Amino acid sequence: MSDRRKRLHELLLALINKQDYLELIEDDSNDLAKSFSENESRDFSKSIERNRKILKKYHSLVRTAVTLDALMDSENEENFKINK
C-alpha cells in the first residue's frame, strides 16, 4: 500500500471513529424491509433513499479525508521549501 493511500486510510478511520453513529447499508432487501412497517415495506423507494443518504455520508467522509491529506501535503511542501 502506498504511503498516501495508507495516510488516507488512517484519516478516514479517524473520521469514522469521530462519528456518533454511522449507519450501514444492508445487503439484503428483506433485512431492509424489517425496519419498516408493512405499508412502508411495499415502498422500497424509502430504502433506496435511505441508502442514498448513507452513501452521501460516506462520500463526505472520504472527501474530508482527501482534503485533509492534501492540506497536510501542502503544509509539508511549504515547510520543506522554507527549511531548504
Image (cartoon, helix red, strand yellow):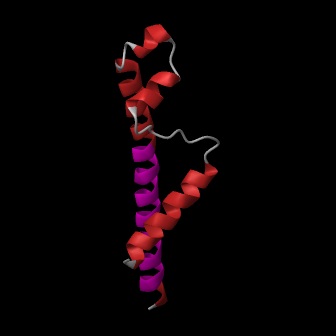
Is 77 a magenta residue?
Answer: yes
Q: Position of residue 60 (x, y in %)?
A: 43, 45
Task: From this view, report whether residue 68 is shown above or below residue 84.
Answer: above
Stretch of the chain drawn in magenta: 58-81
Determine whether, in the image, residue 48 is placed left or right of residue 33.
Answer: left
**Residue at image location 47% in from the left, 72% down from the top:** 75
Task: Say which quadrant the C terminus sits in.
Answer: bottom left
User: Which of the two residues, 68 or 81, is positioned nearer the viewer here?
Assistant: 68
**Residue 18: x %, y % from top left:** 62, 51
Work out whether 40 lies above or below 53. above
Q: Residue at x 39, y 46 (%)?
A: 59
In this orientation, which residue lies closer to the viewer: 64 or 37?
A: 37
Q: Position of residue 32 (x, y in %)?
A: 45, 28
Residue at image coords 45%, 40%: 57
From the image, which quarter does the N terminus lie in? bottom left
* 8 lies above or below 59: below
Question: Which quadrant holds residue 20?
Answer: top right
Residue closest to the far front: 30
Give the image location of residue 25, x and y in percent: 44, 39
The outermost residue toward the top is 39
Main SS category, magenta section: helix
Compared to 82, does 35 lie above or below? above
